[in-house]
Amino acid sequence: MLKLPVPKANYHNVVVKPSEMQIRMVEALSERADKVRNNEVDPTVDNMLKITNDGRKLALDQRLIDDTLDDFPESKVNVCANNVFKIWQDGVPKKTTQLIFCDLSTPSKDKFNVYDDIKNKLIDKGVPEEEIAFIHDAKTENQKAELFEKVRNGDVRVLFGSTQKMGAGTNVQDKIIASHDLDCPWRPSDLEQRLGRTVRQGNTNEEVEIYRYVTEKTFDTYLYQLVEGKQKFASQIMTSKSPARIAEDIDETALSYAEIKMLATGNPYIKEKMDLDIQVQKLELLKSSFNSVKYELEDKIIKYYPQKILETETVIEGLKADIKIANSNKSDKFTGLVLNGQMYSDKKEAGTQLLEVTKKIKSPKPTKIGEYRGFDVLCVYDIWERQPYLKLKNNLSHHLELGSDTFGNITRLDNCLNNLTKLLDSNVAKLDNVKKQLENAKEEVKKPFAQEEELKTKKARLYELNSMLNLDDTNREKEETHYYKEVFTEEDKDNLIANGFDNYVQKEDSYIFKVDISDKDKIENILSSPSQKMCI
């Protein structure tokens, strides 16, 4: 398979400090979570999903929560704008291009959004407005094609978009020198889609820069850690490095009450828990791989090796018997060849008749045509090669190809039988090797997982941390019997209402339905377009 080159990706994790307002607003999210948990607020007014989304917006820019707040100079939006401008400046001679991914704050004429904010800042710094574009402005396929062509040519040098709109099918890689992830998506596949727009065949740059922006002490760090953990687990499944067959749903969901609380309080054990999560997951995957190999060996000990030994011993016994027969009918002179019941003692005549008889065979089933040195001579027609070949059969069958030479085919018959001793030696060595493999396998399955104690210790500590942070499953809320389903289209809303689900509240760009847990499957069947995962 032809493997075309792709550029080398250099990753930059840009970590910025939060503003004092962001810190206070994260604390406010904790207070909202308390009220939700204590049923002090109607879930159609506030719930964990809404708190989670607000936490993500807050990590991106505080003005997404309150557009009257100041533009924090050291926010990741401003840091990104500075990076984009510098890279734009450096790339003027080659007209290199850049992508900016942001899912949370897309263009809007009626409210503050990150797209227009960065665009205006770039224009103020000196970037021509015509060199900046939003993929959202390309409404039709023709408009998209025209926009993509401008990016490939370097006429548009900064392209903004969401993962959904600027993911698969966006072929603009020719001059891309940098890609910027302003927010963290929920799914590992979304990060891959973003990366795939740049690290792609056809990019003329040998190296590219991938920037990922994180605001400290906000939801950012934890969300990236969650996505990283899901990605590692999913990769193990996809590459069959783990016997696991079921993966956690990794679509968008809400953080739990406990997760929001630990992020909001800045608990010092968070970092230890995040590190341990990855370490324990890695060790568990190693153990799964170890067990997979162990189970395979156990299966081979019970089935494969005994069967292989029996088969090889049977072949050896058959070869010994055939060698004895071949040697007892061996002579320095031609011993004669029987074809269709007639003995041919003359070697030339026998070779000539052998060619004539085999020409008439057109069946793929073995057909007996004669006898030679105590063996039946069978002819088989190879329908793929469109030519016959021979088998010498007694205890075992021995394959040989036919040639066009009269004397040569008789020599082939003798060589086939004379080589049986070499074949016997090969099978004796094979038997010895299989028996050694069996003994080695028996020893290997006795060995324990080398890192078992390390895994136990780290899992115990992780359990302690989860209990301390109220993250263990036993402490999660179980009294709730409702799901909150967020949908984004009028069609989905109308379909749900038509089917009797009318308990909902309207947000700016979506609708949240309160649904009984028993109706989960029914709800999913009704919905006609992808939306957020149900969440407790």
Image (cartoon, rainbow, N blue to C red):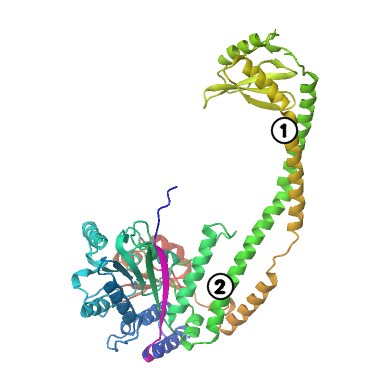
In space, the residues marked 2 and 1 are separated at their CA atoms by: 53 Å
Q: What is the span of residues highlighted in magenta in the rendered image? A: 7-20
Image vertical order of residue 448 relative to residue 372, above or below: below
Viewer can see residue 229: yes
- Determine the residue positioned at 21% across, 80% down: 124
* Tags 2 and 1 touching, CB below 8 Å: no
**How crowded is the residue under tag 1: few (<14 C-alpha within 10 Å), some, or many (20+)?**
few
In the picture, measured across the screen, residue 320 lies left or right of residue 462, that is: right
Of badges 2 and 1, the one in the foreground is 1
Residue named by callout 1: 423
In the picture, measured across the screen, residue 419 lies left or right of residue 70, that is: right
- Determine the residue positioned at 31% across, 81% down: 78
Viewer can see residue 165: no
Residue named by callout 2: 278
Residue 233 among magenta residues:
no
Look at the numbered disc 1 and give the secondary structure of its residue: helix
Tell me the kind of residue under disc 1: Leu
In the picture, measured across the screen, residue 393 lies left or right of residue 492, that is: right
Q: Image quarter for residue 289? A: bottom right
Image vertical order of residue 267 relative to residue 335, above or below: below
